[in-house]
Structures are given as C-alpha cells and as structure tokens.
Amino acid sequence: MLLDSSVKKDYDILIIGGGIAGMTAAIYASRANLKAAIVEKEICGGLANWTHTIENYPGFNSINGMELMEKIKQQVILHDVDVYEVTEIKDFDFSTRDKSVIVDEFNLQAKSVILSIGRKPIALSIDTEDFAEHIHYCSICDGNYYKNKSVLVVGGGNSAFDESLYLAALGVENIQIIDAMDHCIADQSIQQRALNSRVISVLNGHTITEIIEEKGCGIVTIKNLQTQKTLHQKADGIFVFIGQQPNTKEFQGVINLDKKGYIIVDQSMRTNVQGIYAAGDVIVKKYRQLTTAASDGTIAALEAIDYISGDFLA
C-alpha cells in the first residue's frame, strides 16, 4: 500500500532520473503531445555535469559537461516538461495499470514510467574514516581546495585522466595516478596529454591499502600487486575514479536486475514489468556513452508512446 501524499499529479509518462537519457525521453514524449515529468534526486544532467571536458558529443568540438547538460535541460523546459528536483523517492507502486511514485509531498501517477536512474561512483574498499573529508569523487566540486598541494588520483580510465588534467589546470602541484592494472585503459590521446604535463605521473600495478591522517595530511600505504611490497606516501587529498554502480537498490525485487544490479531490458528498452522501461547507463549493455544514453532514451520514449496509444486508447 502506498504512503499517503497530499498533492496528486497525473502524467502520461513519468521519467525517473534526469540524465541525458531521461531528458531525451522527456523531449520525445512532449513532442508526441503527451504530458511528461522528470523526477531527479540531485540535479538534471547526472554525472555528466561533473565532466570537465566532453569532446565526443556531436555538434561540439569541446564543451564542459555542465554546460552541455544545461543546454539540454533548457530544451526540456521549453517543451513544457515538469521537472521535480526532490529529496527522495518515498514509495512507488508499479503493480497496477496506472503507476504511482511518491516524491516529497507529491503523488505522481503515470500510464508509463521510464527508469533512467544512472549510476554512482564506487567508493574505496578500505577504511577511510580517518581521512574521509579529504577523499573526493569529483574534481570540479572539490579540486579548488588543492591548489599548490599534492593529491593522489585512483583509477586508470578516462575519468581518472580527465579529472587529473582538470586538477593540473587548477594549479595542483603534484598529481599521481594510481591504477591497479598493469596498463591504463584510458584513451591514448588523453593519456598522452596527461603524461605531457609536468605535474602528473602514473603508477601502474599498485593499490591503496591504508590511509592514516596525520596533522591534516594523509599517510597512504600503497602496495605493489606483483611484488607485494609497500611504500608510504603523503597526500593532501585523494580523488577516486574506479568505476560506478547502478542506482537500482530501491527497485530490487520489482524490476529484474543482473548480478551487478543493472536493469535487464530487451531491444525496445522494456523491463519485466508492463509499462515500465529503462534507459541509459543503468541498463545492461556494453557501451556507456552520452550518445548511447540519448539513443536509449529515444527508444524508451517511442516505445512508451506506442504502449500508451495501444494499451490505453484501445
């Protein structure tokens, strides 16, 4: 039974998650003359907001992530899509023909729901309590504090290198990238740009095993995964980019998920629940890019539109 809520709102399509997949879906729903809304627990644009430079989105040689997401959000607003930036999803019911989602003081009901709830950063798997306030997952958010200081960046993908370049541009004095793999998986072009920087270095085949705070500085134990030998290094801060995990915990037991928690969909973005679709980084798929997320959102919206016209108007 759903929690009671004071304000009821009816929609054709309700989109949970305001990243690029969700915003694209909203635009398509609105253009089909359907009443659509987006529910976002943070800010529209998702993790893409915190990407310093995007160079592989068609139409832009280079653009800041937040700038691109704001352009798309403004397009969503121009299409008269309601956007709820809420604190939490309190409850939901997908078992009936009309779906219901309780957010803050609103009871949002819709004929179809699109889940584009994205992912969140994976945290370090060690005790970081002593140094927690100096461990970060976003250089745009927290990088300014480390001008003229030394930091460690954990990870070997594009995010780790892109964020390192951004930290260097902010004036961070020394940046060491630590990657557990024996070679980094970031694009060669971005690796080369990082290696050309005088303040960035890379340490492969190593992992952080312990962090101790001492007079505001972190004493970090780093282990060589091949020799098992350890070294100790001081760091003013640590930025972590070791991957992401899907935001699907609250939908377990209702929506079919794979072992990693990603939503299982067919080629039409349909889940196991009639009228519920999913799109973007949260679904099971090989490639997770802004362009593929936009494609997923397009397909999910068109399929939801078709579902509504067939099931509700028949």
Image (tube, rainbow, N blue to C red):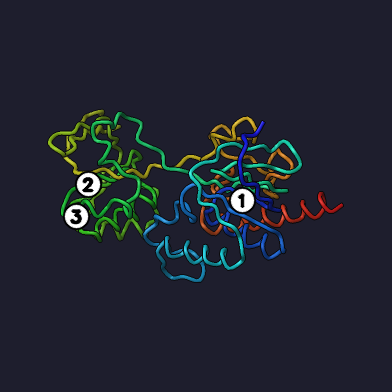
Q: Horizontally, is 80 left or right of 148 in the view?
A: right
Q: Residue at x 35, y 58 (%)?
A: 190
Q: Horizontally, is 106 left or right of 119 in the view?
A: right
Residue, disc 2: 151
> What amino acid is labelled 3 in the image?
Lys
Q: Residues within 10 Å of mark 3 (few under 14, many from 20)?
A: some
* Looking at the image, residue 298 lies above or below residue 214: below
> What amino acid is labelled 2 in the image?
Val
Q: Nearer the viewer, residue 92 or 56?
A: 92
Residue, disc 1: 15
Residue, disc 3: 147
Q: Secondary structure at mark 1?
A: strand
Q: Residue at x 77, y 55 (%)?
A: 306
Q: Secondary structure at mark 3?
A: loop
Q: Residues within 10 Å of mark 1 (few under 14, many from 20)?
A: many
Query: Is tag 3's residue or tag 1's residue first in the polypeptide sequence?
Result: 1
- Residue 125's x, y, as percent? 36, 31
Q: Are marks 2 and 3 in contact (CB under 8 Å)?
A: no
- Measure how far apart labels 1 and 2 are at the Cα level: 38 Å
Q: Residue at x 62, y 42 (%)?
A: 101
> What amino acid is labelled 1 in the image?
Ile
Q: In the displayed image of the protein, which residue is found farthest to the left?
A: 215
Q: Nearer the viewer, residue 103 or 241?
A: 103
Give the position of the N terminus as an image quadrant: top right
- Measure how far apart labels 3 and 1 are at the Cα level: 40 Å
